[in-house]
Amino acid sequence: MNKTVLFLFSATGLLVVNNLFLYWQFFEFDLNLFLSNTIGIALFLEAFLLMLLLAYYFKHHPIGKYKWYWLIILSLLGSLLFALPFYYWLNTKDKK
């Protein structure tokens, strides 16, 4: 895959998606409102479970020297849109 495309997706995840989430978390978050939003809960569960599923896949089918748990760390630091292309780039940057 083109390294520029990976970088653009990863940067979008880190700079756009993650910043929107952090803004919401610090300035607009209301636990009662969140718990009554079934779509919001479903999206959070989906993203979290997809992160675990992808980490499980990469544990059993590694693509490079960086272990599967780095995908979880990167996802928790940013977003899955940031973590997945960056994790892939890290593991394939030395391959031709």
Image (spheres, rainbow, N blue to C red):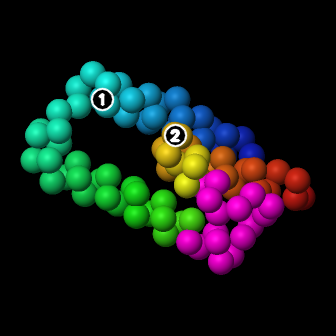
Name the residue rendered at 11%, 40% in the picture.
32
Residue 89, placed above or below residue 55: above
Q: Position of residue 71 (x, y in %)?
A: 60, 55
Residue under pointer 2 = 78
Location of the N terminus (image quadrant) = bottom right
The circle drawn on residue 24 is: 1
Residue 58, placed above or below residue 88: below
Element class at badge 1: helix
Residue 53, placed above or below residue 46: below
Name the residue rendered at 53%, 40% in the picture.
77
Residue 54 quadrant: bottom right
Location of the C terminus (image quadrant) = bottom right
Neighbour tally class for label 1: few under 14, some 14-19, many 20 plus, Cα within 10 Å: few
Q: Position of residue 9 (x, y in %)?
A: 58, 42
Q: Amino acid at mark 1?
A: Trp
Name the residue rendered at 23%, 53% in the picture.
41
Q: Position of residue 92 (x, y in %)?
A: 79, 57
The one of 27 and 18 positioned closer to us in this rendering: 27
Outermost residue toward the bottom in this view: 60
Q: Give the CA separation, mark 2 to mark 1.
A: 14 Å
Element class at badge 2: loop
